[in-house]
Amino acid sequence: MQVNFKGVTADYQIGPIRSRNILHHVNLCLPSKSFTAIVGHTGAGKSSLLKTVNGLLLPKEGKIQVGDQTITPELQSKVVLKHVRQSVGMVFQFPESQLFAETVEQDICFGPMNFGVSKEEAKKSAKDAILNVGLEEAVLSASPFSLSGGQQRRVAIAGVLVMNPDVLVLDEPGAGLDPQGKEEILTLIKYLHESKGITTILVTHDMDDVARYADDVVVMEKGKVVTYKPVHTFFNDVVQLHAWSLDLPEARRLQLRLEEEANVKLPKVCLTIDDLVAALIEVGLA
Ligand SMILES: Nc1ncnc2c1ncn2[C@@H]1O[C@H](COP(=O)(O)OP(=O)(O)OP(=O)(O)O)[C@@H](O)[C@H]1O
Ligand SMILES: [Mg+2]
């Protein structure tokens, strides 16, 4: 499902009269089944942009098209919002903080039952969802609060997946997990993206995540989209990245150092250590 931002401006009300502009004329068309990373400094508007995708934050001007649904400033229709929220799964930062029910199963069933799915159907879907996020069926009867942080995050993601979203929007899903837990979550997200063809939008501060998992990158600055490029092109332009004070992925940093020290130019932009090893072998340096 395509997500198309057309001239989107948004603000937050910060008092009875005053408001503050947060997004400025965002034009961005993310194709169906794409995996896009959104990066930028703190306060750039990344989370706010995500919120517009499922109507949590309505635009002040412009519109967002999600598949054949359109979110506009004057959108009052609960039917459209319901459709949009069914199609767009949203994983907030620290999603496990929203777990609330006595058992994992009840927690996961809450969404579908709210949308009118029968208890029996919801339970069946909950079982599929829990297996899909790599947990065992037995977890369904456990209290969400008896699980580890990484497991809780998987349960929270299962609660989003159970709605069968066409678009998955994730706000720093690896935050606060140890490196292994983080890698597991992101590998899971990539797997779901590939196996179900879900259009995925990932906000992250980690350039290694961008390099490893995304196909395209959006950079936001002060509420504006300042670039939108495929990852290889993006990480090729080191001078521009430096100007934005954005890091490079580890493999790309190593590549530049090796190129400088050995006075060679490797044939391609290396985004992972495997890429780098292959390129070194190709030029006879390994
Ligand atoms: N509910 C709110 N009410 C008023 N202002 C807000 C609200 N949420 C965010 N803002 C402001 O909007 C701007 C953009 O915030 P946003 O959370 O979208 O940034 P971000 O890029 O996600 O930052 P971070 O990387 O720190 O998560 C910031 O200046 C922030 O202070
Ligand atoms: Mg944020």
Image (cartoon, rainbow, N blue to C red):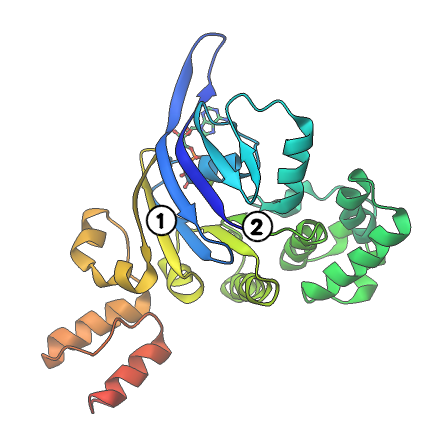
Residue 27 vs 144, above or below: the answer is: above
**Residue drawn where x is 24% and y is 85% of the image:** 280
Give whichever of 210, 205 is nearer the camera.
210
- Cα separation between marks 2 and 1: 17 Å
Q: Earlier along the polypeptide chain: callout 2 or callout 1?
A: 2
Q: How many marks?
A: 2
* Foreground: disc 2 or disc 1: 2
- Residue 133: image x %, image y %? 67, 63
Structural crowding at the residue carrying mark 2, measured as other residues with C-alpha within 10 Å and reported as few (<14), some (14–19) or many (≥20): many
- Residue 163: image x %, image y %? 71, 49
**Residue drawn where x is 27% and y is 68% of the image:** 252
For mark 2, give the secondary structure: strand
- Residue 4: image x %, image y %? 45, 42
What is the quadrant of residue 151 in the picture?
A: bottom right
Q: Which residue is mark 1?
A: 218
Q: Which residue is mark 2?
A: 167
Give whichever of 95, 65 is nearer the camera.
65
Q: Is residue 44 visible?
A: no
What is the quadrant of residue 154 in the picture?
A: bottom right
Can you name the residue that lies furthest to the left here? 263
Instruction: Indicate the amino acid at tag 1.
Output: Val
